[in-house]
Structures are given as C-alpha cells and as structure tokens.
Image: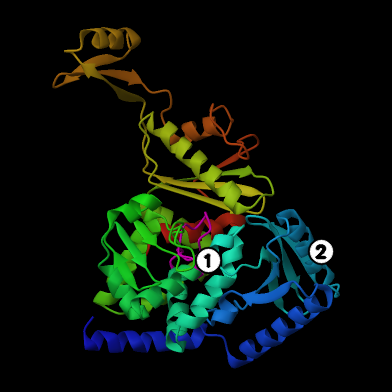
Amino acid sequence: MNANGKKAAERIFESVLAKIKPSEEELRKTTENINEITAALRKIVPKEVEIRVVGSVVRGTQLRGESDIDVFLLFGRRLKRDYITKKGLEYAKKIISDKRDRYEIRYAEHPYTKLYLNSMGVEADIVPAFNIDKIEEMATAVDRSPMHAEFMIKHLSDRQRDDVRLLKYLLLQHGIYGAEVATGGFSGYLCELLVHHFGSLIDTLEAVSNIKVPIALAPAKREAISDKKITERFHSDFVVIDPVDTDRNVAAAVSKESLSKFTVIAREFVKEPSMKLFENKKRASGYQQSLEKFLTDSGLDAFLICMKVPDKSEDTIWPQLRKVSWLIKDYAERFGFEIWYLIPSVKGNVGMIFMLAPKKTLKSRLAKGPSVLLKEAQVEFLEKHKNALGVTFFDDKIYALEKNKYSKLEEVLRYVVTGKLKKRHKDISMSGAKLFVGHVPAEYAQLVYSGLLQKISI
C-alpha cells in the first residue's frame, strides 16, 4: 500500500475506532464490576485458590459493549478435575445475591458457570482451572488461558490493541469472527497474534492479501516457517503456532472458506481503502423484504427445512447439522438437482437448513454407464436399465435415459422431511420437520438473511 493509501486507511481506522472502542465510562464501569465480582469471590473462595481475570478486558482488546468478564479460579495442580469443577460451580453460584441475576452451566472441556448479572449490567464467566507455571503441567485446555493473557499483555502496544479491535470488528462484519464450529472463523486470540506477528493492522491486511498456502507462522518469534513438515504435522494449510503451547495451532478452527473470504477482503482494502468494508450489512432492517427481493432478483428457488434439535451446545449440534445438509445435497444430486447454497443455522431448539437452487424440472435424466469395451460391465448396465426410455452413446461410454424418480427439487426435499433417508445423526432427526418452499417465516428471516449475506458478499 502506498503512502496515500495508508493515509486513507488511517482515516478510516480512526473513524471506525471512535465507534467501536469502549468509552472511558464503560472502562471505568468494567473495572468496578471486576472489582465487585472478584471481591465477592474472595469472601467465598479459599486463600489457596487464585482468582485471576483473563480475556479481552485485561488485554485491552474488547469492543464497545462487549466488556464481558472472564474470571478464572486457579486450583492447585494436585487436585482432581471433578473436584475443581464441582467447587468452581459452587463458588460461582454463591455470589448471586440479587433476584435479577441468574446463572447457566455451560460446557467447554469441563463445566463452567456463566453469570448474567443484570443488577450490574454485565455477564461473567467463572471458569475453574489448574494453576500452572509451564505448559507441560497443563491438565485441561483452559489451563493455558491465563498464560495467553500474560503473553498478550506483555507484547501488545496500545496502538496494536486498537488495531486488534479494528480487525475483530472487520471480521465480525463479514461473519468470520469467532472460532465456534458454526462460524469457523478467527478467534479473538488469533486476531491478537496476527497483529502482534505482523506489527499492525495495515501490515496484517497486506500480508493476508498476498498469502500463499500452506503457511505456518510462529508469533513467539514473529517468523514464518517454511518447513512443510509443520503444516503436515497440524494437518492444516494455515498454521499459527501458539506461543504458549507449541503443540497447538491457534488457527485450527479457521475454515478454508473463512480464510478465502478474509483474503479477498484484505485485497480489496489494500487495493482501495474503503469504509464500506467496515459497514455492518447484517444489521439492516427489513430482513424478510430484503430476502424476498434477493430471491426475485436472483431467480433462484428457496427452501427452508426446520427441525427440532436438543438443548445442547452449538458445538455439538452444528457439525451434525452441517453433515445432514451435505447428505441432503448429495441425495439431490443423485437425481440431477443442484443446490448452490446450503446455509445451516440454529435458533434455540430449532435447527434450520436454508437452500438456494436454480429452477429446474427433470422428468428424465441420463444415467452414465461404463465403456462398451468393458463387456461384462456394459451387459450388466443394460440389464439394470432395461426399462429405460432409451440408450445413447458419448464416445465409448453408454448412457441410459431414465425417467427421473423426482421431477423437481421440492419433491426430493418433501421425501427428505419424511425422515426416510437411511442415514441420520445422533441428535438430528427429520421426524416432525417442516419444509417451507419459496418463503421464510418471519421469525427466521433475520437469521437466514444474515447467513445469506455472509455467503454472498464481502
């Protein structure tokens, strides 16, 4: 990026930062909340258990309105995991004293408590973990989180903290911020490491715009590693080695789609810095009208399957929902129907699969056969398709013109929602599923349209 481009980028960054950086009042209130929560815990938690605040609020990389608090209860390494989990939940629940407050038990590698402290206007995660001095002592994945905080506090300058905020916000606008299975994007920690590794947001965007995979980065030394054995070891084309735990790829959750999208975003910004790339398209009003307009303009057929899913974490439901989506797509393709977009999503206890496909009627289809030079296979093919409408040849290959089992994709999907497809997944069942053709109910329009925008736009 030339000097003029960098000046334009800096003006954009300054403008965006004014909107997304927490105000002095928010920072002051956050500090008060942290002090109040930790003081309440200190009255309950034994002296030998260390109370430590980690996460973006102590690293100084949180976005405005996102100053949620992560408090770790660090227990002695000799204790058992079940014991620290039980005690962690017990201590967390005890600090709730106001009727407006409530808690939920969440599950990562082990249970932790999410507090909704409405009386304070804040949410807080209370996470039990082991107090370790070196990574070799790690017993659970969360044990390294305090070490992550220490590394970033030490290595990020104030300017870089603001650059991390800008990077998070940019990725958020395009639906690729967050390491959850549903997103397959960039975690907050990964954003911090990228800015630290490359030095600034502009340098990060320039590097990503020229990215060539496979690539391995070592932020601890701010070096790129050319040894292919590293990417092979992590079974990934995009590796960012955790400075705290060299056996971990911080970018493991980033899907190829998310990396590709970030690459294009970076190239567009480097070519011509624009505020448009920081605009949040997902928060526009009139979701249903916008969706209907898109369907009219694109001329595509739209289908939505809604099914009940159990009250489990999205990390459990999402992979299964995605696999079911692929199963449906594969089944439709067997009968000659293309599905261009598959957009799974979850809202409460409802799992959804939104599909866009070209309009098509196929009363017949060509079934591809073997080469006529393969006598036994060719004879077997003709016997199998003896009731075909006709037989034809392309080069040495034989084809049978068969009457299609389904003439429209809608018919395929109506069969799918009967639950008769042989394969299914543990928590996903089509029993009682509903199929909506050509429209999306109002209660799901926002989620579906947001998912669509993430797929079709940069």
Residue 69 % position (x, y): 65, 75
Secondary element type, mark 1? loop
Left or right for 200, reference 70: left
Q: Are the residues at dot 2 and dot 1 in contact (C-beta closer than 8 Å)?
A: no
User: At x 34% / y 55%, what residue is drawn?
Assistant: 230
Q: Which of the 4 image quarters holds residue 231?
A: bottom left
Q: The residue under label 1 is which amino acid type?
A: Gly
Range covered by the magenta-colored residues: 174-188
User: At x 52% / y 63%, what residue is drawn?
Assistant: 287
Foreground disc of the pair 2, 1: 2
453 or 26: nearer the eye?
26
Question: Which residue lies under the disc numbered 1?
Answer: 286
Report if residue 281 is visible in the image.
no
Magenta highlight: main SS: loop
Number of marks present in the image shown? 2
User: At x 36% / y 89%, what residue is drawn?
Assistant: 11
Q: Quadrant of the C terminus?
A: bottom left
Question: Which residue lies under the disc numbered 2?
Answer: 90
Q: The residue under label 2 is which amino acid type?
A: Glu
300 or 211: nearer the eye?
211
Q: Is residue 166 magenta?
A: no
Report if residue 24 is visible in the image.
yes
Q: Which of the 4 image quarters holds residue 3?
A: bottom left
Residue 441's disc number: none
Left or right for 95, reference 170: right
